[in-house]
Amino acid sequence: MWSSRITRPLVLAQLGILLLLLVIWASPAEAQPSPGTQGKPPGPFFSLSGTVVEQFDSDFDTQGSYSVSSLLLRASVAQPVSRKTILGLSLSYDILYYDFSDDVVLESASPWERVHGLNLALPIIRRINEKWTMVLSPSIGSYGASGAAFSDTLTYGAIFAATYAFKPDRKLGFGVAAFERIGQSRGFPFVSIDWRLTERLRLTNPLTVGPTGPAGLELAYEISPKWEFGAGGAYRNIRFRLDERDLEPNGIGEQRGIVTFARILHAINPKLNLVIYTGLVLDGELRIEDEDAQRRRTVGHGTAPLLAISLSGRF
């Protein structure tokens, strides 16, 4: 069972600890290869990131308002096993703290407070030839409010994509994703792109494809070697199991909306990036279903401002 508690100050404290670890691990010093490793595949390559997101108060169409504070942690490793194949492991953990006003009317009881999301993916990247690359990434995860039975929170699925490199800095791909998400089967196509439009401007995907949605699109402009500006958007959909004491006992909660953002990136050193985001959640809504995934109520809310700070390191 999920049982941990979190508050906004604790979210900031955890990000501070992560910053300290990243600064220590992402020092600019380069490790020297050990004797006897010449000719072996490079790697493994590690990445680690932590993001604090504050979705500020937004009024419901009916009555009351709510906000969400989130801590998002990501860790991954990639290991080339041959000249054409890379095996990966990606782990993410999210905790979302919901704050509802006292006058919220969703049903007849208090809504949920904390939601935990855990996802494990095993990407396999295969280079077919000089132009084509294939990716297959099965995953399994858990999304549930504090107190929900772990076995009732499971979700699983897979992503398949094929990418064509017109040039090394002009890549375009198409893929499909399918997930079983707590009483709901969901599939969607997506586009993967990394396309340099000019020397400093490129079109990319800002997010990864997963149970919460596709990757979105972003325009990024390189201001200088250490600074970059970006703007984009993506659709996001978080679906989670409620516990027996929540609004709908053992039911299902869902938060969805279109996220638009602008960001500024600063490369602290070659291995460590700091990114500050500001944005909006558009066309947002909360949805409540019973234990058998039958809809009970959907409540829309107004545009919600966003602010986020992210740290990411590569090792």
Image: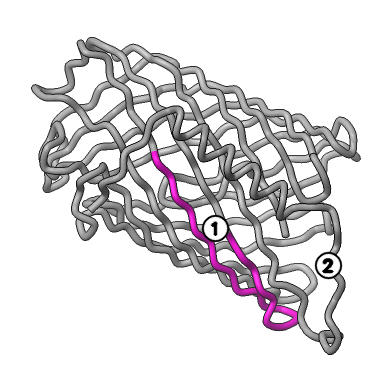
Please, is residue 165 above or below residue 285 in the view?
below
Identified at 44% across, 18% down, the residue is: 56
Q: Which residue is mark 2?
A: 31
- Tell me if 273 is positioned left or right of 310 in this view: right
Amino acid at circle 1: Gly
Mark 2 or 1, closer to the camera: 2
Query: In x, y percent, where is residue 176?
Result: 49, 57
Please, is residue 62 above or below residue 70 in the view?
above
Amino acid at circle 2: Ala
Please, is residue 163 above or below residue 243 in the view?
below
Give residue 175's mark. 1
8 and 271: which is toward the camera: 8
Identified at 65% across, 57% down, the residue is: 47
The chief SS type of the magenta part is strand
- Tell me if 225 is positioned left or right of 54 in this view: right
Magenta stretch? 76-95
89 in the magenta segment: yes
Mark 2: give few (<14), some (14-19) or many (20+) Cα within 10 Å.
few
Identified at 22% across, 13% down, the residue is: 102
